[in-house]
Amino acid sequence: MYNCCMNMNVETIIKTNKKIPLHKRTIIHLALVNNKINEQMTAALKPFDISIPQFNVLRILRGQQGKPAHLSTINERMVTKMSNTTRLVDKLMAKGLVKRSICKQNRRKVEIVITQKGLDLLEDMDDLLFELEEHLVGRFTDKELIALNTLLDKF
Amino acid sequence: MYNCCMNMNVETIIKTNKKIPLHKRTIIHLALVNNKINEQMTAALKPFDISIPQFNVLRILRGQQGKPAHLSTINERMVTKMSNTTRLVDKLMAKGLVKRSICKQNRRKVEIVITQKGLDLLEDMDDLLFELEEHLVGRFTDKELIALNTLLDKF
DNA sequence: AATATATATTTGTATGTACAATTGTTGTAT
DNA sequence: ATACAACAATTGTACATACAAATATATATT
């Protein structure tokens, strides 16, 4: 089902026969792993015609449990920056997955809520995405995952 | 000098008070770390008016040691895909950092070499980038870095 | 009240990325 | 020799991202 390689050798992947210093190697390695994850996530979302950032916005909105979220709130909870959020929401609007209105208490703010259509879409995706996440870390024991998280915390 | 946080707590960063399952947490964690690295790399390259992918292309070309590289070769060695490489090289051309010519043996292919200006630029950046890489993994012991690389190999 | 400042969002521009379609060239089969 | 497939690169379109500038509203200052 999934595209997978048994040995993610950094030197092989970037096709060099030089030995890469450990520091540099680690940074490249992280980028490669991240790439692989993104590719598989993108592929999994593709049938739903949704991008990773759009998916993240929807999940943030679902987490609000009916309460509208301001653009700035969405932005805070996203990994990336504001400049996109307006346009991301535009695209979700165009698909009817979210609604937008001006906040009456503070007319500078914009309130965004996920629509039923958006919730239904997320629900359709839940199982598939869960499986993908399981698969992505499928070769790790819980102990190893904890070790990995502990190491990542050092960044 | 560098922007740095002592504790990269995933839940704090994405502002949730829910406990995230280990699998999902790991994947988010990787994205956050990668983001942080990219931000700092981008900032370090900014004074040189060069993007990360452009920098990678230049380094690949320097690795050729005078020998021209075909577009497809560059592409193979990059983390990302072909569609960009043509346009990346266009921009490097515009800055006079690389030269491009059609391969005489096989006129479908394009040969790219780094110019002296490109080599000089890379040399100017070398120290700074080395320091940045050191800094990024500065809180790791070599043993930890090896452990991290070993774990990343499982992806 | 008028002005300045801060906040929230939007818009413009440049860059990078994914995917599909297209162009030009080479190699192969008949 | 012609036709067809394979290959290498380019181009078009849509999306995402970084950064700066602009717009609109609210708050603070005088």
Image (tube, coloured by chain):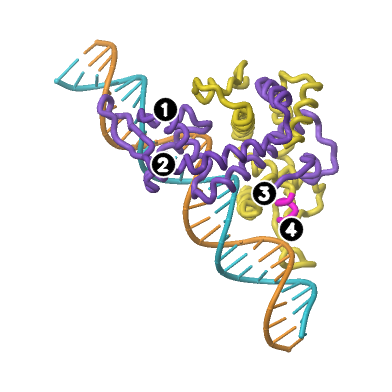
Chain colours: A yellow, B purple, C orange, D cyan
Name the residue type under label 1. Thr
Q: Is residue A46 left or right of residue C23?
A: right
Discs 3, 1 touching: Cβ within 8 Å: no
Marker count (numbered): 4
Please give the residue where the numbered disc 4 appears in the rendered image. Answer: A111
Question: Who comes first in sequence, dot 3 or dot 1?
Answer: 3
Q: Give the residue displayed 69% in from the left and 50% down from the top.
A: A98
Residue A25 is situated, as x and y percent measured from the top left of the image, at: 60, 28
Question: Who comes first in sequence, dot 3 or dot 2?
Answer: 3
Q: Secondary structure at mark 4?
A: strand
**Tag nearer the camera, 3 or 1:** 3
Please give the residue where the numbered disc 2 appears in the rendered image. Answer: B118
Q: Give the residue displayed 76% in from the left and 67% down from the top.
A: A106
* Dot 3 crowding, Cα within 10 Å, few <14, some 14–19, many 20+: few
Q: Secondary structure at mark 1?
A: helix
Mark number displayed over residue B44: none
Residue A71 is situated, as x and y percent measured from the top left of the image, at: 71, 56
**Tag nearer the camera, 3 or 2:** 3
Highlighted range, magenta: A71-76
**Tag nearer the camera, 4 or 1:** 1
Q: Is residue D18 left or right of residue A144?
A: left
Name the residue type under label 4. Glu
Look at the picture and state if A125 lies above or below B94.
Answer: above
Say yes or no: labels 3 and 1 on the same chain.
Answer: yes
Name the residue type under label 2. Gly
Discs 4, 1 touching: Cβ within 8 Å: no
Which chain is home to disc 1? B
Please give the residue where the numbered disc 3 appears in the rendered image. Answer: B1
Which chain is home to disc 3? B
Task: Report the Cα–Cα distance between label 3 and label 2.
Answer: 27 Å
Depth order, front residue of A3/B67: B67
Say yes or no: labels 4 and 2 on the same chain.
Answer: no
